[in-house]
Image (cartoon, rainbow, N blue to C red):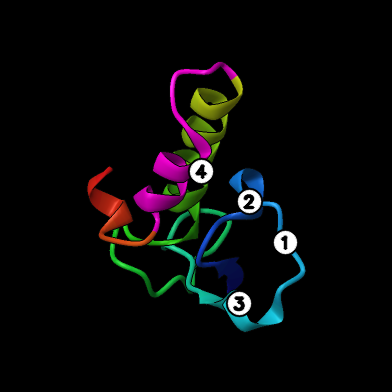
Amino acid sequence: MNSTTAYPSRSEARPRDLTDLWPEPWEQDSQHPQGIARPGSGAQSKDKIENRVKAAICNGRMTLELGQQVFLGNWWQA
């Protein structure tokens, strides 16, 4: 299990806010053979989206507010 926040620390200024933390399951793969998340819905997939959103924010292609909104809804459809 990985843990995540409502707003990933990669795009939010409150990474230590414990009220936003919850467990994030891994998808099954060679590094996590016991993973329980559906493909595309686990920690590995979310990490990829977080990295893309961070890059977009840092490059000025996306506002911080829009980047945060990605993770408030169905982030796996981002």
Residue 50's disc number: 4
Q: CA distance from mark 1 to mark 4?
A: 14 Å
Q: Is residue 40 visible?
A: no
Closer-to-camera residue (41/16): 16
| Helix, strand or loop for disc 4 | helix
Nearest to the eye among marks 4 and 2: give it. 2
Marks 1,2: beta carbons within 8 A: yes
Please state which of the two labelled residues, at mark 1 or mark 4, is closer to the viewer.
1
> In the rendered structure, are the residues bearing label 1 and label 3 in contact, judged by CB atoms less than 8 Å apart?
no
Give neighbour class at mark 4: few <14, some 14-19, many 20+ (Cα, 10 Å).
many
- In which image quadrant can residue 1 be found? bottom right
Question: Which percent across, then down, holds residue 8?
Answer: 57, 55
**Residue position for label 2:** 12
Residue 63 within the magenta-colored segment of the rendering: yes
Of mark 2 and mark 3, the one earlier in the sequence is: 2
- Tell me the magenta residue range: 59-71
Does 15 sit above or below residue 12?
A: below
Distance (Cα) linking label 1 and label 2: 7 Å
In the image, residue 72 sits, relative to residue 13, either above or below, namely: below
Q: CA distance from mark 2 to mark 3?
A: 13 Å
Would you name the residue on which mark 3 appears? 21
Residue 32 location (% of width, % of height):
54, 63
